[in-house]
Image (cartoon, helix red, strand yellow):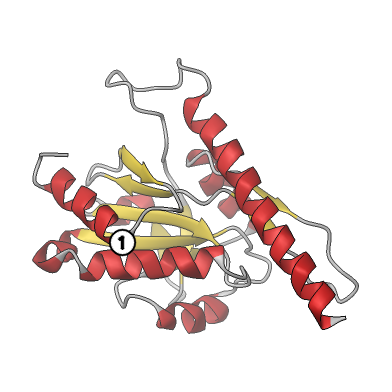
């Protein structure tokens, strides 16, 4: 029985990742009118959430910093912790430049990801990481601004459920504008190299 549940668990994760990649790719590529004059997708925008210390956090609070923005949730079985570990290793590989970069995790599961849950969870990753939650409406506004796909799967008999969501990590500029995105398969060193190149003006 446990083996069967594990197989279903793994299959659901693979399907969620594949669906997220397809949908997010469509979001990034669809509708050429939704681009800036420089030809960049219109990703990002205002948000007002709450960080893992219970403080109100707005997008404007991070001006002047390069942002690594990831959407995920603490009950995610493997994709989210794997991506957070990639961010952790990339941050460590940046050297002194890391002080100019702020990693953010925005939950797609605000019903379960309370301030306390997030505070406990992110202790496993880079100390600079800030986790954000909020009301369902606030989180929905943030996912819409970043063109992130997110959907709650039907709960099982125990009430547990998965969140299907896209898994790109966004690099945003100090002015809050989209610069680049990283696919889930990106290696930490490749991420660090790209961030460093962008900051130096060679990316």
Residue 132 location in percent, x, y?
Answer: 47, 64
Please name the residue that numbered disc 1 is placed on.
Answer: 188
The structure residue drawn at horizontal position 45% and vertical position 21%, both measured from the top left corner, is: 34
The local crowd at label 1, few if under 14, some if 14 to 19, many if 20 or more residues have their Cα within 10 Å, is many
168 vs 79, left or right, is: left
Residue 89 placement: quadrant: bottom left
Q: Residue at x 54, y 46 (%)?
A: 143
Vertical placement of residue 190 versus 29, above or below: below
Element under disc 1: helix
For residue 41, above or below residue 171: above
Evaluate whether residue 64 shows in this view. Answer: no
Q: Residue drawn at (32%, 50%), measured in percent from left and top?
A: 60
- In depth, the one of 119 and 197 nearer the eye is 197
Q: Is residue 189 among what the camera can see? A: yes
Image position, residue 24 (x, y; %): 54, 39
Please provide percent x and percent y for residue 189. Answer: 25, 60
Residue at 30% x, 53% y: name it.
Answer: 67
């Amino acid at each position: 029985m446990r083996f069967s549940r594990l197989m279903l668990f793994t299959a659901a994760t693979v399907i969620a990742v594949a669906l997220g990649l397809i949908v997010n790719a469509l979001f990034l590529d669809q509708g050429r009118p939704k681009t800036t004059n420089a030809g960049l997708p219109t990703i990002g925008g205002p948000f007002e959430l709450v960080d893992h210390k219970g403080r109100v956090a707005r997008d404007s609070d991070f001006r002047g910093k390069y942002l690594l923005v990831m959407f995920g949730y603490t009950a995610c079985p493997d994709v989210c912790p794997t991506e957070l570990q990639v961010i952790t290793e990339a941050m460590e590989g940046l050297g002194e430049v890391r002080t100019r970069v702020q990693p953010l995790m925005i939950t797609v599961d605000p019903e379960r990801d309370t301030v306390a849950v997030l505070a406990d969870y992110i202790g496993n990753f880079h100390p600079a990481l800030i986790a954000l939650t909020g009301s369902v409406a606030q989180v929905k506004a943030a996912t819409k601004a970043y063109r992130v796909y997110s959907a709650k799967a039907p709960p099982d008999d125990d009430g547990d459920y998965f969140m299907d969501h896209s898994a790109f990590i966004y690099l945003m500029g100090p002015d809050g504008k989209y610069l680049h995105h990283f696919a889930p398969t990106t290696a930490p060193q490749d991420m660090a190299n790209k961030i460093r190149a962008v900051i130096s003006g060679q990316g």
